[in-house]
């Protein structure tokens, strides 16, 4: 159940909303897209800017996708500049297939070697699709003829729009895209999946204004997603998933005065890390971050660096937050963390089957020390942070697993 909110927020809602919106617009394109009749030039700068921004933020999948959309639009809008031997529907199917592969593709630097390899991969996929659609061996095969007839009888509404090879390819592409989108629910995957839906709609209700609208929409959404991904990378801590030190600096700049700041540190973390290994140390940091992120009283948790964390309580003085911080300290100290053993079974036992016991199991308790300080007009953020750090040092000297106020 914990997986469902992430799936809905980052996958289902964007896919459903954008798909429905584009479908409605395509159904009434004569009324809604008339303003694009004399603006066929607009996708060129928008897609170019989107590709440039994607390249600057090292998100190569969107860089390639924008260039491919640009090639598709140019080949249809200006065939004299970029002649093509295929029909628009075949080109759209090719782009759909390449997009389904880009969803699985890992963002890599745009070095010459990567550009060449990816270009070869894209060209190979396009060539394979063209061969499947135009292969005389395939279309003349008796098995194919019989299957095509059965397909037309069983699914007449689908056969009116797609040939059997086209329907099979689209089904394959969408199955591949959906598997990746649901296994790894990210907005990046959702946007590429939505673009595939738009391409299918365009192939059946084709018009240049509709294609231009889809290209403009894809370019704008690409820039939005690239910036959102970059913001997440800059302001989210990759290991723990909570806000990073950079986010702390930006957050406190917006608060001006009168807030409590708390410095927290995992007790004996270095010896713990040396004893159990860095993987277990990462487990500890994730567990601690999860507990701190549940802070109440309007507080916000940040990872300051290493095993240090920071809590900020806007509009609260230390006396108002001391009980909340102490409750956090207690919840962390009482949390029994089971260390994952190397011989732990990789799969859950089947129903009625006795689980395999690990040769050894270890449960550990982690404690943290906290220092609280107050930021007001007379105290700068740097001074308040130093005071909180001094209070943290007092908590360490007092035996750890305690809270001290500066």
Image: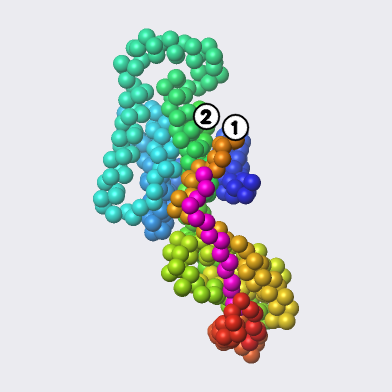
Front position in the image: 142 or 212 = 142
The answer to whether residue 130 is left or right of residue 287 is left
Residue 234 magenta-highlighted = no
In the picture of the structure, the residue carrying the numbered disc 1 is 27
Count how many numbered circles sit on residues in the image: 2
In this rendered view, identify the residue nearer to me: 241 or 324. Answer: 324
Q: Quadrant of residue 133?
A: top left
Q: Classify 10 Å Cα crowding around label 2: few (below 14), some (14-19), many (20 and above).
A: some
Q: Position of residue 260 (x, y in %)?
A: 66, 79
- Percent coordinates x, y for residue 69 in the rendering: 41, 42
Q: Residue placed at 45% from the left, 24% from the top?
A: 168
Q: Nearer the viewer, residue 299 or 270?
A: 270
Please state which of residues 3 and 162 is positioned toward the viewer in this rendering: 3
Residue at 34%, 17% (x, y): give it: 138
Picture disc at residue 205 = 2
Q: Position of residue 49 (x, y in %)?
A: 42, 54
**Do the numbered discs 2 and 1 sit on residues whose CB atoms are within 8 Å?**
yes
Q: Residue furthest front?
A: 359
Q: CA distance from mark 2 to mark 1?
A: 8 Å
The residue lying furthest to the bottom in this view is 378
Q: How is the image coloured?
A: rainbow
Question: Does any portion of residue 234 appear in the rendered image?
Answer: no
* Rendered-image quadrant of the C terminus: bottom right
Magenta-drawn segment: 356-370
- Report whether 65 appears left or right of 398: left
Please, is residue 49 above or below residue 250 in the view?
A: above
* Label at residue 287: none
- In terms of sequence position, does the residue under pointer 2 or pointer 1 come before the other? 1
């Amino acid at each position: 159940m914990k997986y469902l909110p992430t799936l809905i927020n980052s996958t289902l809602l964007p896919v459903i909303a954008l798909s429905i919106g584009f479908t409605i617009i395509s159904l009434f394109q004569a009324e809604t897209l008339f303003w694009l009749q004399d603006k066929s030039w607009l996708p060129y700068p928008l897609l170019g800017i989107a590709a440039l921004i994607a390249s600057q933020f090292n998100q190569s999948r969107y860089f390639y996708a924008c260039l491919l959309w640009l090639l598709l639009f140019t080949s249809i809008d200006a065939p004299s500049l970029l002649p093509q031997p295929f029909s628009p529907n075949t080109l759209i199917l090719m782009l759909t297939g390449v997009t389904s592969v880009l969803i699985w593709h890992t963002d890599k630097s745009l070095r010459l070697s990567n550009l060449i390899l990816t270009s070869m991969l894209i060209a190979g996929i396009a060539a394979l699709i063209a061969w499947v659609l135009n292969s005389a061996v395939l279309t003349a095969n008796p098995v194919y003829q019989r299957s095509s007839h059965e397909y037309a009888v069983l699914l007449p509404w689908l056969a009116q729009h797609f040939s059997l090879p086209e329907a099979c390819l689209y089904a394959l592409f969408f199955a591949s895209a959906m598997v990746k989108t649901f296994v790894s629910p990210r907005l990046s995957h959702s946007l590429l999946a939505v673009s595939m839906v738009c391409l299918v709609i365009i192939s059946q209700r084709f018009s240049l204004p509709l294609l231009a609208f889809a290209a403009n929409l894809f370019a704008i959404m690409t820039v939005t997603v690239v910036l959102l991904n970059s913001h997440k990378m800059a302001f989210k801590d990759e290991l723990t998933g909570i806000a990073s030190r950079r986010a702390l600096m930006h957050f406190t700049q917006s608060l001006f005065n009168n807030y409590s700041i708390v410095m927290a540190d995992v007790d004996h973390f270095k010896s713990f890390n040396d004893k159990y290994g860095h993987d277990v140390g990462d487990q500890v940091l994730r567990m601690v971050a999860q507990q701190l992120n549940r802070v109440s009283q309007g507080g916000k948790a940040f990872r300051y660096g290493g095993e240090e964390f920071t809590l900020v309580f806007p509009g609260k003085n230390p006396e108002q937050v001391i009980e909340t911080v102490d409750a956090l300290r207690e919840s962390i100290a009482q949390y029994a963390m089971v260390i994952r053993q190397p011989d732990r079974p990789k799969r859950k036992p089947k129903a009625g089957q006795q689980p395999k016991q690990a040769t050894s199991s270890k449960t550990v308790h982690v404690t943290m020390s906290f220092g609280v300080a107050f930021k007001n007009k007379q105290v700068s953020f740097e001074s308040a942070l130093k005071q909180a750090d001094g209070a943290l040092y007092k908590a360490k000297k007092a035996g750890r697993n305690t809270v001290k106020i500066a």
